[in-house]
Image: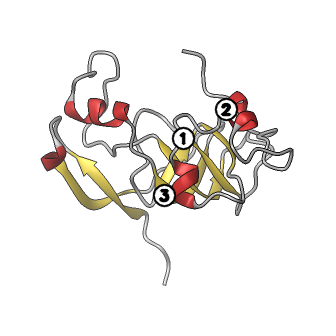
């Protein structure tokens, strides 16, 4: 049976508290030329995620509704944008996407690094801005094998 072009995702249709969250079907996302798509093993929830969902930062970080909360995730690469190099389908990575999109079966990442093999999915999803090369190089289990030599650094603020 062929896979439909929909996935399960946590979404919200209006700004507000946790009561706005619902699990529902959403269209599969497609990576742009400089992005990858992962099958999410574990998403992360950070303070900015609830601020975005609540609308507290909508002037600074507006989102199109309905939105999928979360921006950090760990997962296995299943699609690669046309200009992406240094990562392959099947690689386990951690990273971040846009302002939203991680609490779903599939997520788009715009910055990523290899997930350390010694970390569980939950551990790899936990760090804020996981693919930062400086952070990954100093991480608790960082080694030359874990270093994000092929990662894309997060965009400068």
**Which residue is drawn at the image coordinates 67% and 32% (left, top)?**
135
Residue neighbourhood size for the residue with mark 2, other residues' Cα within 10 Å, grouped as few (<14), some (14–19), many (≥20):
some
Label number found at residue 42: 3
Q: Nearer the viewer, mark 3 or mark 2?
A: 2
Residue annotated with mark 1: 127
Query: How far from the left and from the top, in percent, is residue 105?
Result: 44, 61
Q: Nearer the viewer, residue 1 or 65?
A: 65
Q: Secondary structure at mark 3?
A: strand
Q: In the rendered view of the protein, which quadrant contains the C terminus? A: top right
On screen, residue 99 above or below 5: above
Pointer 1 and pointer 2: residues touching (CB < 8 Å)? Answer: yes
Task: State which quadrant residue 45 falls in.
Answer: top left
Q: Earlier in the sequence, mark 3 or mark 2?
A: 3
Q: Is residue 66 left or right of residue 37?
A: left
The Cα–Cα distance between marks 1 and 3, rounded to whole angstroms, is 12 Å
**Which mark sits nearer the N-terminus, 1 or 2?**
1
Q: Which residue is mark 2?
A: 135
Q: Are marks 3 and 2 in contact (CB under 8 Å)?
A: no
Q: Position of residue 84 (x, y in %)?
A: 73, 41
Q: Secondary structure at mark 2?
A: helix
């Amino acid at each position: 049976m062929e896979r439909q072009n929909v996935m399960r995702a946590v979404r919200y249709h209006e700004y507000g508290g946790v009561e706005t969250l619902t699990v529902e079907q959403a269209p599969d996302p497609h990576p742009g030329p400089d992005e990858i798509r992962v099958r999410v093993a574990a998403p992360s929830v950070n303070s900015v995620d609830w601020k975005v969902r609540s609308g507290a930062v909508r002037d600074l970080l507006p989102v199109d509704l309905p939105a999928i909360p979360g921006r950090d995730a760990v997962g296995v690469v299943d699609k690669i944008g046309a200009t992406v190099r240094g990562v392959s389908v099947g690689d386990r990575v951690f990273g971040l996407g846009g302002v939203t999109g991680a609490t779903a079966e599939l997520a788009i990442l715009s910055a990523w690094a290899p997930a350390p093999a010694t970390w569980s999915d939950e551990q790899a999803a936990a760090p804020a801005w996981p693919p930062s090369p400086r952070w990954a190089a100093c991480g608790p289990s960082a080694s030359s094998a874990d270093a994000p030599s092929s990662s894309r650094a997060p965009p400068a603020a």
